[in-house]
Image (tube, rainbow, N blue to C red):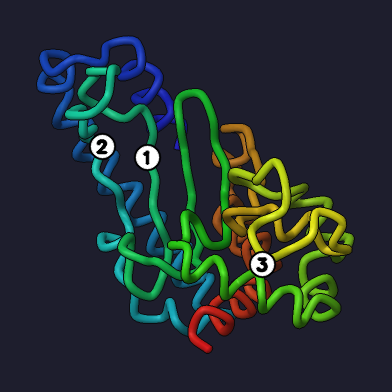
Amino acid sequence: MKEIFSFLDRLAANNNREWFAANKAEYDRLRDMWTEKLQELLDAMALYDGSLAHVSAKDCLYRIYRDTRFSNDKTPYKTHFAALLSPTGRHCDRACYYIHLGADECAIYSGVWCPEPRVLKKLRKAIVDNIEEFRSIVETPEIEATFPGWWGRKLKTAPKGYDRDHPDIEYLRLTEYGKCCELDREFFERPDWIAETARRLALLKPMNDFLNYSIDE
């Protein structure tokens, strides 16, 4: 893992096609290593989330090449390794897991990102209708210590159809339902990082189950 971070640091300092081409063999080797580690993580998570039992790590990986067509930043490469862990790999519009190893930040995530308006409306209604159950899932001391707060954009006021003084307004203002645990690179350099990552993400499986049940209902 130290080699991966070393490569990402050097890529961040030399984000151009010439440097990447000269170091492509190293990138390919490290990507293969990263894929093997991700598969170990998926296998560990499948012990409590059976939907991941037959998922291939290769299907979860994101490309390192950036799409610069609509960006002012024209650097060609991402300076992180990332993967979306779900039953359908990186293509998922339901609650799932995400891992991010970057030159400047590292984190693990769980939840629903950028749900379309119809889905977001269903999630808000499900949370309000089952608020005691939802709070019992997401407000445990261990979750609040490991995944503090909510990740994502919030409305400045109440969504349409709800009063700004609604007792559950802190959940209704969310436009995404995601939890994030920020980490340092030393965490991923520990020999037990796979087991510990699986353990932390297991805390949020009940939340993902609630969200996915609400989406599918």
Which numbered disc, 1 or 3, marks the residue that appears first in the sequence? 1
Quadrant of the frame with the N terminus: top left
Q: Are marks 3 and 2 in contact (CB under 8 Å)?
A: no
The answer to which quarter of the image holds residue 128 is bottom right
Element at label 3: loop
> How far apart are labels 2 and 1 at the CA level?
7 Å
Is residue 179 shown left or right of residue 10? right
Q: Are marks 2 and 1 in contact (CB under 8 Å)?
A: yes
Question: Between 48 and 191, which is closer to the camera in this rendering?
Answer: 48
Q: Residue at x 43, y 76 (%)?
A: 52
Q: Residue at x 34, y 24 (%)?
A: 7
Query: Which residue bears the numbered disc 2?
Result: 64
User: Please, is residue 158 above or below residue 47 in the view?
Assistant: above
Which numbered disc, 2 or 1, marks the residue that appears first in the sequence? 2
Query: Which residue bears the numbered disc 3?
Result: 204
Is residue 152 shown left or right of residue 21? right
Q: Residue at x 48, y 50 (%)?
A: 99
> How far apart are labels 3 and 2 at the CA level?
27 Å
